[in-house]
Amino acid sequence: MKIALIGLGSVGRGVAEMVAKKDLGITITAVADSTSVCMDADGIDIHTLLARKKKSGRCGDEGVSVTELLKKADYDALVEVSPTNALTGEPSIGYIKTALNRKKHVVTSNKGPICLAGKELRALAQKKGVALRYEATVAGAIPVMHLLEHGLAGNEILAIYGILNGTCNYILTRMADEGLTYDQALLEARELGYAEADPTYDVQGIDAAIKLVILANTIWGNGATLDDVERTGIDLLTADALRLAEEDGCTIRLIAEAIPRKHILRVSPRIIPKNHPLVVEGTLNALTLETDMAKEITLIGRGAGSVETASAIIGDLLYIRNHYDKRA
Amino acid sequence: MKLEMKDSPGQLVAALKPISDVGGNIIAVIHQREPELDQDTLNVQIVLELPEGRLDKLIALLKEQGVHIQRIGKKRLLFKRTVILIGHLMHTDLSDTVDRIDSTGFAEVSDLSMSMPAVNERSSSRITIKAVSKKDMAAAMTILRTVARQKSLLLLEPLEDVA
């Protein structure tokens, strides 16, 4: 299977490294980062590519646009892992459309395009007879999409709720365990690389809300948008609040929840018993699905990381290879 | 409530039936035979949950069955929920916040723990609310959400059982 890899940050590098290391039957024939592209229909040598990227900051040559690359290169699937743009989804939406229009499968970890244009992109993929898969957009390595699509096929999904942002979970864990203030815990998260310089996107619950919208649309096709999510962040929490919860055998976690029959689509800090299955430590994610037949299923795993996210992307790629007809 | 009835077959069932007839829910039935007691009667204690305003109807129905009500215990608030409020709680009149719940008559603040940080910093408090029924609790929570919004307080609610 030949792939075009757009984005060579943490996730892109993870995918490239795993493709090089493991015998997966995947060849990378085109790569683009934010400033350059390279392609080779016979397969790019990944070690040379990563060494070049490390040395010069570029993966290849300038002058060819990503769109041109996607129109010209020889590949079966586009792996779109460029940085997310939560406001417009561009330029990724354009890249995904270009590939789909050429009847190429698309696998992405990019939340912006799926949150903003998921319906349109899914329809285009269907029209062109190819797959659009985005397991990596929600809860990193946790295979929630595969579970919903296959393992829980035939179930009615009644509710989905859990912890979808590792940065917030890390901050809350540290506030509870060490009595840190919010500012102290945030500083620590930054030093460890868990939080961005501008943490707004994480701590105000926007990231969790985007993932909730992706889940809700995938499960119920209800056309939910980011504006429909009732959202409260963790940035106003006090160390005292965590101590008061603790005295009661509880703690506080940022919970994203979608319960259609109660018209709930919400991200908010909640009081939760410490022995509750959703109370996970550090940067972990956890998610409970409630269904009519299987009842509750809770998944716990890593929500971010280079190789962890690559796991979700490679899972999607191999699924496509094994379930779609190979084209000449 | 403590009931006294004839110790004959079918009497206990006859006494319990009116409870479900008025939409009540039996939580416990305690039935002890005391040796020094007159053999003809049976003393039964029943703990039950009743919708608001159905007690008089139940008393009337029980009397029809020939059941004597010895004592009716105190109404207990059965539903409990603990929330946390964060913000300028004193400046926004905490006693008014509590009173908005207590004055409903169907719910009350039964416990309050509070942290008192430096003067201008936001304080945090844990508040336990009790109510007679699930519906009353929901109404109390709606009031509390409104108050929190009016006073710019952050209200943390528990993650309930979704089912």
Image (cartoon, rainbow, N blue to C red):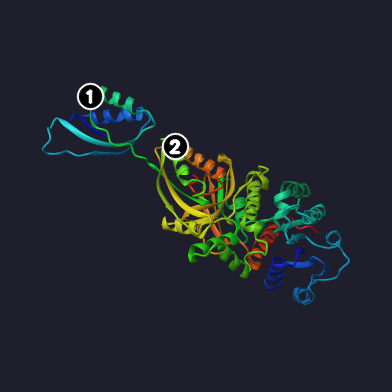
- Picture quarter containing residue B18? top left
Left/right placement of residue A130 relative to residue A293 reads: right
- Residue B159 marker: none
Q: From this viewpoint, is residue A275 visible?
A: no
Tell me how far mark 2 sits from mark 1, CA to CA.
33 Å
Q: From this viewpoint, is residue B139 visible?
A: yes
Q: Name the residue beneath numbered marker 2.
A: B136
Q: Secondary structure at mark 1?
A: loop
Q: Secondary structure at mark 2?
A: helix
Residue B87 lies, in percent from the top left, at 53, 51
The vertical placement of B128 against B36, above or below, is: below
Do callouts 2 and 1 mark residues in contact (Cβ within 8 Å)? no
Residue A202 lies, in percent from the top left, at 63, 58
Front residue of A58 and A251: A251
The vertical placement of B103 against A327, above or below, is: above
Left/right placement of residue B46 relative to residue A79 reads: left
Front residue of B82 and B54: B82
Residue furthest top in the image: B64
Q: Name the residue beneath numbered marker 1.
A: B66
Q: Residue at x 32, y 26 (%)?
A: B56
Front residue of B138 and B49: B138
Residue A103 lies, in percent from the top left, at 80, 54
Residue type (three-letter) at the residue carrying disc 2? Asp
Number of the front mark, 2 or 1: 2
Residue A328 lies, in percent from the top left, at 81, 59
